[in-house]
Amino acid sequence: MSSNQPIDIFFAVLINIANVIGILYNIPQMVHTYRRKTADDISALFLNLRTLCSVIWIIYSVYYQLWYVLISFASSLVSSVFISYYRFEWIRKFIQRRDSDSVKTEKEKEVKTYAEMVDIVIDPREGTVDNGDDARE
């Protein structure tokens, strides 16, 4: 600290208050977006510029070891990415498709393909197979 210790303490407290506010002011919009499951009313240009600005400030703050600045812009980046997930439908669809594809195992894909080829119905509740013989009799 410098010779102006009371001023340095004041600014240290002030920047901590600012970081808490910086984190808190993002929460209402994130909650609102999550509840509505859309962010179509938020400008795409705003989100892209905010994300880019946050990334640049994060790089700068890491390089110069400005941890208070890093905290502030990291919270803005997290908020921007979260809102972008709901704003840009293609991101949401890509993630959902990727997740649903990864859940299916190769065996499940083979079983489904085989069931479609021989035109049978598998009842998962009973574990029985109906190959359509009853309808043909």
Image (tube, rainbow, N blue to C red):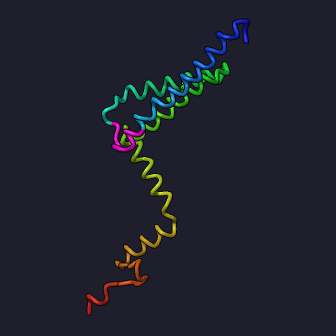
At which x and y percent is residue 59?
60, 24
Q: Which of the 4 image quarters holds residue 123?
A: bottom left
Q: Is residue 70 left or right of residue 135?
A: right
Q: Main secondary structure of the magenta part?
A: helix
What quarter of the picture does the C terminus occupy?
Answer: bottom left
Q: Is residue 11 above or below residue 78?
A: above
Q: Would you say residue 60 sits in the magenta stretch?
A: no
Q: Which of the 4 image quarters holds residue 117?
A: bottom left
At horizontal 42% and vertical 47% (from top left) the residue drawn is: 94
Q: Is residue 7 above or below residue 82?
A: above
At horizontal 39% and vertical 43% (from top left) the residue drawn is: 34
At which x and y percent is residue 126?
41, 83
As drawn, the residue found furthest toward the top would be 3
At which x and y percent is residue 5?
70, 10
Q: Is residue 82 above or below residue 108?
A: above
At horizontal 51% and vertical 30% (from top left) the residue drawn is: 23
As drawn, the residue found furthest toward the bottom would be 137
What range is drawn magenta here? Answer: 31-39
Q: Is residue 12 left or right of residue 105?
A: right
Q: Is residue 36 above or below residue 21?
A: below
Q: Nearer the viewer, residue 47 or 102?
A: 47
